Amino acid sequence: MKLDRLIASHEAMGRQAAHRAIAAKRVRVDGDIVTDGHHPVDRFTLVELNDVAVQQPERALYLMLNKPAGILSATKDDQHPTVIDLIDDPDKHTLHLAGRLDRGTSGLVLLTNDGRWSKRLMAAEEKVPKVYLVETTDPIAPAAVEAFARGFHFHTEDITTLPAELVILGERSARLTLHEGRYHQVKRMFHRVNNRVVRLHRESIGSVALPGDLLPGQWRQLTAQEIQAATTSC
């Protein structure tokens, strides 16, 4: 929303009166005088007119969670425990997920109530890297590295996956970096090289990495630096 629209709606003062108030330096946004009526504001913004709050800011939340396998990436489910059930915060009902994981996959999940932030982080055109540790039933053939880099055509969606970086760590383990998030993508890609994923763990999304001291089932708020860096790199 633009600042002038918010001020105009205050006690139905109208757009012209709002413009006059803004031009007269009677409006503050997060404590600073703003004279541009097109200045963007959202529900997390404190807006004051004549030093009286026109809008009190809502509390913005940006969380990371180390999801255990078996927990559902959803905000509500009648049958299975969800990631929201693991969070102890009075405003957890406002959260949504910025990037889901399959029920059997563990690792980093980001949650927020800031839709603009999550949309930018998850937008396909941004090609935000997502890094996974993978374990397989059979040895990973060296030729798989080139196959992942070329991409695979998925006939169901009629798309070809973006080039992915596969680094073989051991006979049956690898680190995989994707720049998209197709349905069961990792499992389907390994199926194409005649292998099966038995364990999948997400280490990072963009510049936000799961810290080693955050145990499965634990969560914490992102730092201001992490919040900014997550979308700056997009």
Image (cartoon, grey):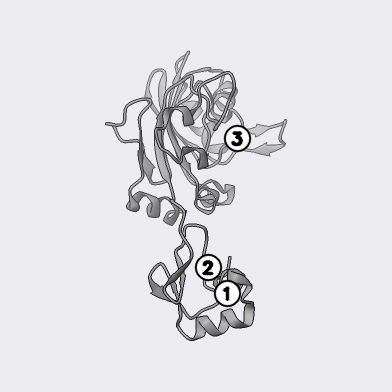
Q: Position of residue 185 (x, y in %)?
A: 58, 30
The answer to which of marks 1 and 2 sits earlier in the sequence is 1
Where disc 3 sits, the SS reads loop
The amino acid type, in three-letter code, at marker 2 is Pro
Measured as percent of width and height from the top left, residue 215 is found at 32, 27
The local crowd at label 2, few if under 14, some if 14 to 19, many if 20 or more residues have their Cα within 10 Å, is: some
Residue type at the position of mark 1 = Asp
Name the foreground residue: 81 vs 57. Answer: 57
* In contact (CB < 8 Å): disc 3 and disc 2: no
Look at the numbered disc 1 and give the secondary structure of its residue: helix
The one nearer the camera, 197 or 67, is: 67
Quadrant in the rendering for residue 8:
bottom right
* Mark toward the viewer: 1 or 3: 1
227 relative to 98 in the view: left or right: left
Answer with mark 1 or mark 3, whichever residue precedes in sequence.
1
Image location of residue 85, percent across then percent down: 46, 27
Outermost residue toward the top?
Answer: 137
* Residue drawn at (38%, 70%) of the image: 31
Residue 218 tag number: none
**Mark 3 — residue?**
182
Image quadrant in which the N terminus is located: bottom right
x, y percent for residue 3: 54, 71
Mark 3 to mark 2 CA distance (whole Å): 33 Å
| Of callouts 3 and 2, the N-terminal one | 2
Reading the image, the residue beneath label 1 is: 4
Tell me the CA gap for discs 1 and 2: 9 Å
Residue that sits furthest to the left in the current view: 213
Q: Which residue is mark 2?
A: 40
